[in-house]
Amino acid sequence: MAFDIFMILIAGWTFIMLGLMIIGGFFMFRKFLRRMPKEDGYSELDWQDYYIEQALPLWNKDAKALLNELVSPVPELFRDVAKERIAGRISKIALDEGVKTIELDQIMKGYIIATPKKDHKFMKKKLKQLDIDYTPYLDLFEFADDEKQKFSIFEQTEKVNSRTS
């Protein structure tokens, strides 16, 4: 009887550990795929780091504070990754537009495009809390990151720049 309970506990523990390893492996594999070089020899993360580094002088204290506030609803475990992804997109837009400092316009464009479509409900709620009007940017929601469409968020530049502001 005690041996049977012990064997059931061992089997249960084995399934739990196997499940956790599969989940962890899935997320590590996704990160690995983002680190894989594309046709130009650079990965998505390489480009993200490049744009952030190039646009670092354009970020003022207010822009950094707003970015931190916008990513605050993201769980702390994923917050740094989300912030880097959004900052990379904002930096790319700011560099393409040739602005002197990053303002609300560039932050909104990058924030909307870099945020996955499944999180738009939370994003809109946060923008309403901050009294930020996102209606001028409604057309950008269609260019947002989508798990079903496997495109780089940096490939949307022409669409963002060609839109009527």
Image (cartoon, helix red, strand yellow):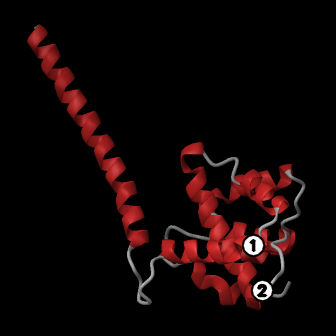
Please state which amino acid type lies under the numbered disc 2: Glu
The tag on residue 22 is none
Which quadrant, please, contains the N terminus? top left
User: Residue 13 location, x and y as percent?
Assistant: 24, 29
Mark 2 vs mark 1, foreground winner is: 1
- Please tell me the numbered disc located at residue 97: 2
Relative to 155, 1 lies left or right: left
Q: Residues within 10 Å of mark 2 (few under 14, many from 20)?
A: few
Residue furthest top as drawn:
1
Report the front residue among 112 and 121.
Answer: 112
For disc 1, the neighbor class at 10 Å (few under 14, some 14 to 19, many from 20) is few
Asked whether residue 141 appears in the rendered view, the answer is no
Circles 2, 1 touching at the beta carbon (< 8 Å)? no
| Residue 82 visible here | yes
| Three-letter amino acid code at the position of disc 1 | Pro
Assign a secondary structure to mark 1: helix
* Label drawn at residue 57: 1
On the picture, is 94 further left or further right than 81?
Answer: right
Describe residue 85's horizontal placement relative to residue 7 as left or right: right
- Identify which residue is drawn at 40% across, 55% down: 27
Q: Quadrant of residue 61?
A: bottom right
**Could you tell me residue 126's position as x and y percent?**
78, 52
Residue placed at 59% from the left, 54% from the top?
80
> What residue is at 75 percent from the left and 91 percent from the top?
162
Name the residue: 24% across, 36% down.
Answer: 15
Residue 78 position, x and y percent, is 55, 50
- Whole-Å distance between the Cαs marked 2 and 1? 15 Å
